[in-house]
Amino acid sequence: MPVPLEDHVRQVLLENQRGAKLYAAVSEGWDRAIRKYPERDRWRRKSTFRAVVWEEMTDEVAVVVAADTGLKWLPHQDTVSIIAEDEVLFRLKHADIALATSSYPTEEAQAFDDHDRDLYGYQDLQRVRLCYVPDKFEGKLIWTGVAAHLRGMFLWNIELGEVGALAPIERLPLQEQGLDVTKIARLRRDREGGVEDNKDAG
């Protein structure tokens, strides 16, 4: 079972403009849920609205899957996943700002990030999550994209926008601090000299 590769998943999202279409589906699902339930702030359980949002988003994603011959719809238990090009499996999930998700701890859910194991009757699929992150008040989406993990450890993410997969933010290289080798040699010589002096003093 391969560990998810960012470059490969980017390529899969680029095909047929999948990244842009999935972003639009997630956004429309969210907006539709907001329009349907204007009094959601009165609900006592946050999980109620999250379940509604997931259903609306899943309906929109299903339209994308139906129009793309390279995508497959995979129902399993009480959820669904998407298989792209018989290579990458996407699972739609609500996430926090650290891109951590929560699931009822079934054996299947706990094994999702264990890439030494195959799931759902398929072999060698790269498994990732299609995540949506709302703000703290769950009034709007602040991030949509793909996240990969390995046994609970974050690996990488790809942010999605209207144009599809966005380019990763380039990080400035850390400036290497030059080592003063003459200073190191001098300190070593002084330290060794001190040891000899101590021996003579004893």
Image (cartoon, helix red, strand yellow):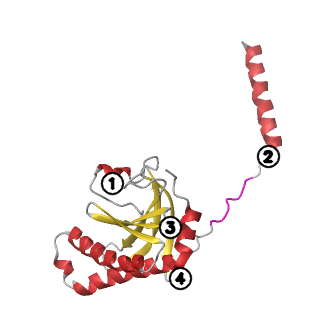
Q: Which residue is mark 1?
A: 109
Closer to us: mark 3 or mark 1?
Answer: 3
Q: Which residue is mark 3?
A: 85
Closer to us: mark 4 or mark 3?
Answer: 3
- Horizontal side of 184 relative to 111 (left or right) equals right
The image position of residue 32, as x and y in percent, is 30, 85
Helix, strand or loop under label 1: helix
Closer to us: mark 3 or mark 2?
Answer: 3
User: Relative to 76, does residue 138 appear above or below in the rendering?
Assistant: below
**In the foreground, 4 or 156:** 4
Closer to us: mark 4 or mark 2?
Answer: 4
Residue at position x 33%, y 77% from top?
Answer: 57
User: Relative to 35, does residue 148 appear above or below in the rendering?
Assistant: above
Helix, strand or loop under label 3: loop
What is the crowding at mark 1: few (fewer than 14 residues within 10 Å), some, or many (at least 20)?
A: few
Q: Which residue is mark 2?
A: 180
Looking at the rendered structure, the kind of residue marked 3 is Glu
The quadrant of the rendering that contains the C terminus is: top right
Which circle's residue, 2 or 1, is located before the other in the chain?
1
Residue 165 can be seen in this image: no
CA–CA distance in space, label 3 to label 1? 23 Å
Which circle's residue, 4 or 2, is located before the other in the chain?
4
